[in-house]
Amino acid sequence: MDASLVLTIGGLIALVVGSVAVVFATFRTNTSRVWREEAEAQKTRADRVLGELEKVTQELTELKTYTHTLVRLLSTIDPDKLEELRLRRGL
């Protein structure tokens, strides 16, 4: 084998190895970017759901307070009617 053939084969091998390394690095970079974007999207959704859950919890608390006020009023106005409602609903 003469030197030019060895250099040609060595150059081709280096080119193939370099190309594989570049493809692998690109794949890893793109995969990392995709996973990062997905994680950010999931966090955004989780924050939105948490905000909605807090709003629903606040509304439920307000409804409970309102219900307790209505029960006190009803028990003051007509205690028998309140007892009838409690028996009917199984409270």
Image: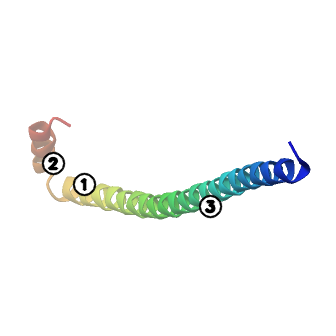
Q: Nearer the viewer, residue 23 or 32?
A: 23
Q: Quadrant of residue 74?
A: bottom left
Q: Where the C terminus falls, by quadrant?
A: top left
- Which of these two is toward me, 85 or 32? 32
Rate crowding at label 3 as few (under 14), some (14 to 19) or many (20 or more) other CA atoms within 10 Å. Answer: few
Is 69 left or right of 21, judged from the image as shown? left
The amino acid on which the numbered mark 1 sits, given as a three-letter code, is: Val
Query: Which class describes the residues within 10 Å of circle 1: few (<14), some (14-19), or many (20+)?
Result: some
Residue at 57 percent across and 62 percent down: it is 37
| Mark 2, secondary structure of its residue | helix
- What residue is pinned by disc 1? 71
Q: Earlier in the sequence, mark 1 or mark 3?
A: 3
Q: Are marks 1 and 2 in contact (CB under 8 Å)?
A: yes
Image coordinates of residue 54 in percent, x first then y, are 46, 60
Q: Secondary structure at mark 3?
A: helix
Query: In the image, what residue type sits under mark 3?
Result: Arg
Tell which circle, 2 or 3, labels the residue nearer the N-terminal end.
3
For the residues bearing labels 2 and 3, Cβ distance under 8 angstroms: no
Tell me which amino acid carries mark 2.
Leu
Q: Label 2, on which residue?
A: 82
Is residue 52 positioned above or below 28 on the image? below
Q: Position of residue 19 (x, y in %)?
A: 70, 56
Q: Residue furthest front?
A: 2
Q: Label 3: which residue?
A: 33
What residue appears at the point 21 percent right and 53 percent down from the top-left corner?
Answer: 75
Query: Mark 1 to mark 2: distance in Å?
Result: 7 Å
Question: Relative to 1, is 31 above or below?
Answer: below
Mark 1 vs 2, N-terminal side: 1
- The residue sitting at 61% across, 59% down in the picture is 30
